[in-house]
Image: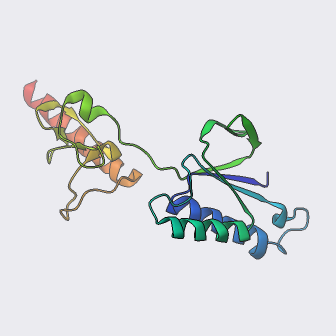
């Protein structure tokens, strides 16, 4: 129960691992009678060769040293192959954990390629104002699979509240089209 596995050593994963280690090993040490938070294992897993891969090698090395000083166990060069309610598997090794935090990011859906439709630099499907796909007025895209301009002219964030608003809007557009046609 005191194993914390963090998957992905980009900025989010590194920050989360450091904060978790500080909480467990310093801040919460005296707050429990029957458990010892300082015995927590914080394991940061990165499939790539180093933490903070988008930063310079010098910054990456400094971050690694800081994490290790905090007691974070860092594993690089091996990706997670199994992730379930009881833990993860990395490079054939099973790590038991009830708390697994995914910070490895996401990749855009390949739908823009499937449809041969325009996409932004991240691979998200470009959509019209009504959330339909250019050249495919019968297809709508919402959430983080699409690049949609929000009310302020910026791209809508890839978060659940924005996706829910887009879904409701697309449903209204579809309903109006069906009612007009029927």
Classify 157 as above or below 33.
Answer: above
Q: Is residue 147 left or right of residue 100?
A: left
**Residue 96: image x %, image y %?**
77, 43
Total number of numbered labels?
0
Q: Residue at x 26, y 28 (%)?
A: 114
Q: Residue at x 46, y 64 (%)?
A: 55
Task: Tell which of 23 and 152 is nearer to you.
Answer: 23
Task: Tell which of 148 and 13 is nearer to you.
Answer: 13
**Residue 102: image x %, image y %?**
56, 49
Q: Is residue 138 left or right of residue 52?
A: left
Point out the image quarter for the C terminus: top left
Q: Residue at x 50, y 63 (%)?
A: 11
Question: Farthest left residue?
Answer: 180
Classify 50 as above or below 77.
Answer: below
Question: Farthest front residue?
Answer: 58
**Residue 51: image x %, image y %?**
56, 59
Question: Farthest right residue?
Answer: 34
Classify 63 as above or below 143.
Answer: below
Locate residue 125: give its quadrant.
Answer: top left
Task: Tell which of 95 and 144 is nearer to you.
Answer: 95
Question: Farthest top residue?
Answer: 182
Structure colour scheme: rainbow
**Residue 91: image x %, image y %?**
67, 37
């Amino acid at each position: 129960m005191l194993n914390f596995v963090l998957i992905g050593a980009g900025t989010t994963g590194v920050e989360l691992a450091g904060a978790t280690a500080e909480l467990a090993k310093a801040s919460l040490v005296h707050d429990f009678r029957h458990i010892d938070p300082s015995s927590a294992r914080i394991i940061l897993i990165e499939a790539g060769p180093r933490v903070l891969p988008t930063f310079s090698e010098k910054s990456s090395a400094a971050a690694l040293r800081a994490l290790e000083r905090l007691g974070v166990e860092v594993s690089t060069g091996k990706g997670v192959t199994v992730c379930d309610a009881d833990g993860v598997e990395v490079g054939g090794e099973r790590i038991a954990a009830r708390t697994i935090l995914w910070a490895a990011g996401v990749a855009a859906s390949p739908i823009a390629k499937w449809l041969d439709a325009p996409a932004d630099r991240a691979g998200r499907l470009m959509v019209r104002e009504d959330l339909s796909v250019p050249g495919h007025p019968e297809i709508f895209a919402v959430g983080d699979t699409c690049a949609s301009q929000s009310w302020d002219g910026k791209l809508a964030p890839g978060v659940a509240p924005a996706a829910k608003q887009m879904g409701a809007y697309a449903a209204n557009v579809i309903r109006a089209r069906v009612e007009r046609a029927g």
